[in-house]
Amino acid sequence: MTRALIQQYTINLPDTYRSKLMKQIAFWQTWMVAGLLMMLSATVTAQEAELTLDDLFATPKLTGTTPSRPVWAPNSEHFAFSWSEPGNPGRGLWVSTSDGKEVRLSSNTTSPSVRDIVWADPNTIVSLRGNNLWQTSLSQKVDQQLMRVEAGARYLSIAPGGNQAAYVNNGDLWLADFHSKQNRRLTEIGIASLSSLPKGRYSRPEREIGPGIWSGPTYKWSPDGKKIAFHLVDRREMRKVPFPNYLAEETDPNEVRRGYPGDPNEIRRVGVLDVESGNIIYLDLPDPHANQVIDFNWSPGGDLLVDIASDTAVERKLFVLAAGESQLQEIWRGVRESRMYTSFGSAWHPDGQQVIFLSDMGDRYGLYAIDVATPEDGPQLLTDPSYDVLSAPIIAGDVLFYAGNGVNPYEQHLYRLDLSGGDPEQVTNLAGQNVGYPSPDGRHLAFRHSNDIAPPELYAVSSEGGGATQITQSPLPAFTERTWTAAEYVTFPSLVDDYTLHARILKPANMQAGKKYPVLFGPVYSNTARNRWAGNYSLVQQLLVKKGYIIVQVDSRGSNGYGRAFREEFLLGFADQDIEDYASAVAYMESLAYVDPDRIGIWGSSYGGTLSVYSLLMKPGLFQVGVAAAAAVDPVFFGTDDVAIVRSPQTNPEIFERKALNYAANLEDKLLFVHGIQDHVVPFKTTAVLAEELIKQGKDFDFAFAPGATHGWSREPNYDRYLFGKIMEYFDRHLDAPVVRLKSASE
């Protein structure tokens, strides 16, 4: 009996090892060993207990605290970051040596969470915690409160010299002086938000120093510390749109500034502030209501580079304001009518005479150099044209660093290029997504790495390459003790043209021969066939796989990594050819013996929700079930930034007739809408209008909403658990049981 128990609990051991173990067990040892093995089995069972939705959204989070962006000391010997060990609340200040061999917590454990980090000198860190600046000395190992700052301070930046720091508060620049412990307001620009509810993407000040709604710089010190270049955003000419707050004591109309395609956009300008006098000069940039400021950067000699692009993405311009001059010089212009959402970025070459910038002039994104003195010579390509550069250029010492997909479209690695000559070299080797932060001297690299089954962690490596040292270990034991499903990456042909399509697939463990499994496409979006951790979405995918679903994500048209033509087919083509990509993917999955063709669903949020609902309406029967979260279903109500893909009603009126309600009569499959009422990006109104039309046409569908959720519902406490629960419940209800086909009389 006892020996049978031992055999039961050792069944997963190799046969030869199990046989040898059994022979060595004396009779008097049997009961002891049996007890130990039963305890071991119980432990393993506990570790692999059923994963639940509550596990995913419990506090503390399974995946722990993601380490912040590392900030290097000016001498490149250390870097600092905010983080907390598994299970600990808040964010402490951590410091690592450049090689990652020595890491320690350097902040007072009773102080508030670290919100921002700067280095005053190679030995001194200044960090923003609550409404105070704290000073940390590495040599003395002292961490103490330095001075108070204005409530709500953010965007901390140390002044050259290290005795002052600037920050932004209520839309204005402030200066904190470390010696006098005084705060001085440098500008009189900020105007409070029109919105009475401080949540949602468009709940922003009427006028402020800061980034635009979607992107843009904030401010930067000149090398001599006498000037600050800043980004001013004025929204007072934008449309007022109500987003009612039903959670107020009485319903609050809650207006925000939010434009639609073709409307006036926010006005974006670049100002240069003289810190001592307070005088401001605004640069004469073209059409500030129609052009976004990508970035600006000071050269070592005090010249200012300004990078702008039209909201349509058609036109890109680089300007230089020479030190002591008042007129901008345009050094480069790129125009292409087919350009849509794209990536931009620029920086000064260490020599201060050339500019390096990211562009899509070729078939792949690349980094180019142009000489400011002789711009007529044109830009020269620096990077390998066979793959995409995926980041703005980063200059450290005499080395250019950048991210790229040279290994395959699914991974992102860091590369280095010696600006004195040579070819680009890959620095990172860990498969997955790697985001890099080189040291000022260019000799070291800190980077955050994640992959399909591992949340982001911080690593350090020599910029010459080699083995990387892991700095952080963030997940709870409840995460690390589980087995998570890695993805497969596959290709298959498009059914409508000559493109090869790429997909990421997660399959349940121990699939049974002859069994048919349900398939879920999602969350659908462009650029999703990627080996990276995607926060709550990754956790939800893993839970769905454990429930028996096959998960599929497709790099549909508009994705990077497959050439410019494939990416730009998305222009004026939303919910069109990309749906054909999903039809091709469904055909591929249906060709697999283990896929149940009668149990295929689709889901996504934002444009992923758009793809879901339009797929059901444009191709009934392609999917049996769809969930459309925060779905953009009426291009008239897209954002002003969306002119990059749909242009405007004035230039392309036919695109704005592609409303989902025009196809409402086609709904045959199961459909669930998920939406937050405080979603400024995709107004709840648009889904309500579509729902009303479906009701009028006698269609059956379902609705889950959250009164206070925004467009970012998937990351918002309580709403994430509730709405993801609704999504899973919906798929379980309609896809869990295999469809039984009844034979016809003729059969």
Image (cartoon, helix red, strand yellow):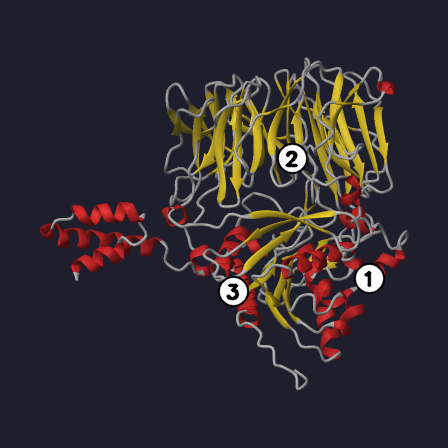
The residue nearer to you, when weighing 114 against 240, is: 114
Q: Amino acid at mark 1?
A: Arg
Residue assigned mark 2: 405
Mark 3 vs mark 1, foreground winner is: 3
Q: Secondary structure at mark 1?
A: loop
The residue nearer to you, when weighing 737 against 462, is: 737
Crowd rating for badge 1 (residues with CA inside 10 Å; few <14, some 14–19, many 20+) = some
Instruction: Using the numbered discs, state the Cα–Cα distance from disc 3 to disc 2 in whole angstroms.
Output: 38 Å
Q: Position of residue 633 (x, y in %)?
A: 74, 62
Q: Is residue 710 visible?
A: yes
Q: Answer yes or no: do the residues labelled 1 and 2 have beta carbons within 8 Å?
A: no
Seen at 72% across and 28% down, the residue is 296
Instruction: Using the numbered discs, state the Cα–Cα distance from disc 1 to disc 2 in whole angstroms.
Output: 34 Å
Q: Answer yes or no: do the residues labelled 3 and 1 have beta carbons within 8 Å?
A: no
Reply above or below: 330 against 590.
Answer: above
Q: Is residue 680 visible?
A: no
Q: Secondary structure at mark 3?
A: loop
Question: Reading the chain from its start, which is encountered first: label 3 or label 1?
Answer: 3
Q: Total marks drawn?
A: 3
Which numbered tag is attached to residue 658? Answer: 1
Reply above or below: 233 against 18.
Answer: above
**Res 567 → quadrant:** top right
Which numbered tag is attached to residue 514? Answer: 3
Q: Is residue 32 left or right of residue 197?
A: left
Seen at 42% across and 53% down, the residue is 59
